[in-house]
Image: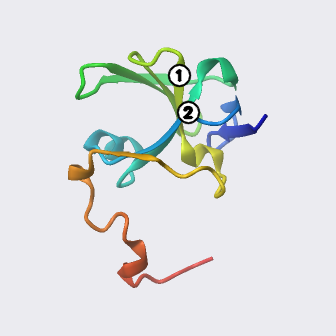
């Protein structure tokens, strides 16, 4: 069985995930943009039973467009949002894919709120950017 580790930037908050994610999605909603400070968020849903959590969290909850509530757990030391609970999916945890720091993590299979996507967000190859590393 696959084991993956997700953590905050300072390492105080750590999740050990057993098995494969049930869903990997990319969200372009404006709230995810504000929450992450990026132009989209990518998250993986894991069965709550397959995730063990160590470390402390601070929380913040908000109501989504659907009317459901998501409770975000972030590290009180470094501020990284690592995972969240969704009242409409009580058996799952959504975990920020970036918290795994693993370029081989499975890619998203679902994209939501494309109407709010920055037009250049998924076309970085064509932007003629300076490249580092």
Q: Residue at x 23, y 29 (%)?
A: 65
Q: Quadrant of the N terminus?
A: top right
Q: Residue at x 43, y 77 (%)?
A: 125
The relative height of residue 50 versus residue 41 in the rendered view (above or below) is: above
**Regarding mark 2 in the picture, which secondary structure is present there?**
loop
Pointer 2 residue: 22
Q: How has the structure been colored for display?
A: rainbow
Q: Residue at x 22, y 51 (%)?
A: 116
Quote the CA–CA distance across marks 1 and 2: 9 Å
Q: Nearer the viewer, residue 45 or 6?
A: 45
* CB within 8 Å, label 1 to label 2: yes
* Image side of residue 58 versus residue 26, left or right: right
Dot 2 alpha-carbon crowd within 10 angstroms: few under 14, some 14 to 19, many 20 or more:
few
**Regarding mark 1 in the picture, which secondary structure is present there?**
strand
Instruction: Quadrant for residue 10, please give it.
Output: top right
* Image side of residue 41 versus residue 22, left or right: left
Q: Which mark is residue 28?
A: none
Residue 114's spot in the image, x, y percent?
26, 51
The relative height of residue 79 versus residue 93 in the rendered view (above or below) is: below
Instruction: Quadrant for residue 66, please give it.
Output: top left
Q: Quadrant of the C terminus?
A: bottom right
Residue 14's spot in the image, x, y percent?
69, 32
The relative height of residue 59 versus residue 43 in the rendered view (above or below) is: above
Residue 42's spot in the image, x, y percent?
46, 46
Q: Nearer the viewer, residue 72 or 87?
A: 87
The mark lying in front, picked from 1 and 2, is 2
Q: Which mark is residue 92?
A: 1
Q: Residue at x 30, y 19 (%)?
A: 68
N-terminal label among 1 and 2: 2
* Image side of residue 68 versus residue 59, left or right: left
């Amino acid at each position: 069985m696959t084991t993956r580790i997700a953590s905050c930037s300072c390492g105080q908050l750590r999740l050990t995930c057993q098995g494969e994610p049930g869903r990997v999605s990319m969200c372009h909603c404006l709230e995810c943009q504000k929450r992450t400070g990026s132009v989209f968020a990518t998250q993986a849903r894991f069965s709550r039973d397959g995730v063990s959590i160590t470390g402390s969290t601070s929380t913040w909850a908000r109501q989504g467009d659907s009317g459901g509530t998501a409770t975000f757990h972030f590290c009180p030391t470094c501020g990284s949002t690592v995972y969240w609970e969704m009242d409409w999916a009580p058996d799952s945890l959504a975990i920020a894919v970036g918290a795994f720091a693993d370029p081989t993590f499975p890619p998203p299979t679902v994209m939501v709120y494309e109407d709010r996507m920055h037009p250049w967000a998924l076309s970085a190859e064509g932007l003629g950017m300076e490249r580092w590393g």
